[in-house]
Structure formats: C-alpha cells, structure tokens
Image (cartoon, rainbow, N blue to C red):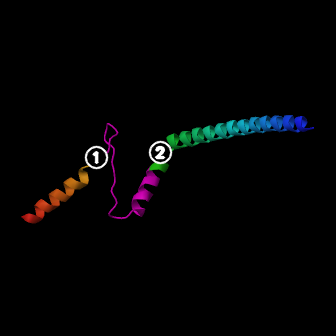
C-alpha cells in the first residue's frame, strides 16, 4: 500500500511538472506573438510614437533631464552642464 502511494506521488509529480512545462511554453509563445504584433504595428505607424513622445514632453516637469541619442546611439550627457556654464558666463557680463 505504501509503495502504491509512493508510486502515485511520483507519477502525479511528473505529470504536474509536464503540465507546467507545457503551460510555460504556451505562455512564451503568446508573449512572443504579442511582441511581434506590437513591433510590426509600431513600425508601420511611426506617427503614434511621435504623438506619444509629444504627449510625454507636455506632461514632464520643467526640470527633467532629457537624453537625446546621437548618430552612434549614445546620449549627450554634458549638454545640460554646458547650458548652465553658458548662462553663467552671460550673466557675468
């Protein structure tokens, strides 16, 4: 009797693990499909991204820092410091 219970537990655990594996695969496939659909939609509708950026800019605080990528894809990090330096130099005159 104990052996039968033990075998049943092992079998049920393996079955549960197999079902969990299948569920994870189904979830991953669904996420991949969603990402693909969203990516294609955004690529075909760049106006939405432009509108979203404009909306974000309208909602931001005036003191927020904005990083603008260059051609190499690297942000210009010193631009804000340079503007402060120029303003300071102009106020000295």
How far is disc 1 from disc 2 in space, using C-alphas?
Answer: 24 Å
Residue 37 or 32: which is nearer the viewer?
Answer: 32
Q: Quadrant of residue 60?
A: bottom left
Q: Which residue is mark 1?
A: 76
- Quadrant showing the C terminus: bottom left
Magenta highlight on residue 56: yes
Q: Quadrant of residue 55?
A: bottom left
Rendered residue at 55%/39% (across/down): 40
Element class at badge 2? helix
Residue 38 or 78: which is nearer the viewer?
Answer: 78
Mark 1–mark 2 contact, CB under 8 Å?
Answer: no
Left or right of 40? Residue 91 is left
- Check the image and report above or below for 55 versus 8: below
Q: Position of residue 46 (x, y in %)?
A: 47, 45
- Check the image and report above or below for 74 versus 66: above
Q: Position of residue 79 (x, y in %)?
A: 24, 51
- Residue found at the very far front of the displayed protein: 2
Q: Position of residue 65 (x, y in %)?
A: 33, 56
Density class for disc 2 (Cα within 10 Å; few <14, some 14-19, many ≥20) is few
Left or right of 4? Residue 16 is left
What is the magenta range? 50-76
């Amino acid at each position: 009797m104990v052996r039968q219970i033990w075998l049943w537990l092992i079998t049920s655990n393996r079955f549960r693990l197999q079902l969990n594996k299948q569920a994870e695969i189904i979830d991953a496939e669904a996420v991949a499909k969603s990402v693909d659909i969203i990516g294609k939609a955004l690529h075909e509708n760049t106006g939405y991204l432009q509108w979203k950026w404009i909306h974000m800019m309208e909602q931001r605080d005036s003191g927020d820092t904005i990083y603008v990528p260059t051609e190499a894809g690297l942000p210009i990090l010193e631009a804000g410091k340079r503007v402060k330096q120029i303003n300071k130099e102009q106020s000295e005159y």
